[in-house]
Image: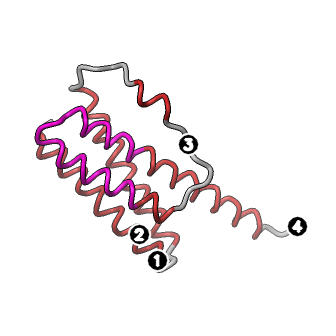
Amino acid sequence: MAREELKEILTSAIRELEEAVKALVSMDNRTLTGKVWKAASDVEYATFLMSLSRRESEDEWKKIWKLSTDVDVGATLITAQNLLKQATTDLNSKDEEAYRKAWLARGHILNVQNKLDKLRARVVHLQRPS
């Protein structure tokens, strides 16, 4: 896959995260969830494509990554967005660094998805009649 196509995918994810932050501010949970899902999908696809052309397979830095249970949704979305912007820039000359940043952004987005899923499950549980 050409670098330009990867940039388009990552840029799409950045836009989705921008929209997710706007939805968070306006308390539009349905839009927030959809935008986070779309960004996650884009980043998952981009990191998969990037991994196909990598030489390295032993990534020690991945072993320290853990899903977090205490996630500030807004701050985490912005962190992911910033990592994706850096990854897009790094695609020009630092493929491994671009992959690492995109992979880390993916993890942050998955943390947000996990928190949103748990919040939604809690709301559904509280709304059920006893």
**Residue 55 relative to residue 119: left or right:** left
Q: Quadrant of the N terminus?
A: top left
- Single out the mark in the foreground, 1 or 4: 1
Q: Which residue lies under the disc numbered 1?
A: 25
Element assignment for label 2: helix
Q: Are marks 1 and 2 in contact (CB under 8 Å)?
A: yes
Quadrant the C terminus occupies? bottom right
Task: Name the residue type under label 2.
Answer: Val
Q: Earlier in the sequence, mark 2 or mark 3?
A: 2
Q: What percent of the width, then of the height, locates residue 75?
A: 46, 62
Q: What residue type is disc 3 on? A: Leu
Where are the magenta residues, as a range?
Answer: 78-106
Marks 3 and 1 sit apart, C-alpha to C-alpha, by: 24 Å
Image vertical order of residue 23 relative to residue 122, above or below: below
Neighbour tally class for label 2: few under 14, some 14-19, many 20 plus, Cα within 10 Å: many
Which residue is denoted by mark 2 in the rendering?
21
Q: Nearer the viewer, mark 4 or mark 2?
A: 2
Tell me the element at label 3. Answer: loop
Give percent across and percent down for residue 99: 28, 36
- Secondary structure, mark 4, is loop
Q: Quadrant of residue 119?
A: bottom right
Mark 3 and mark 1 lie on one chain; the one further toward the N terminus is 1
Q: How far apart are labels 1 and 2 at the CA level? A: 6 Å
Magenta: main secondary structure: helix
Residue plotted at (16% across, 41% down): 91
Q: Is residue 78 above or below residue 83?
A: below
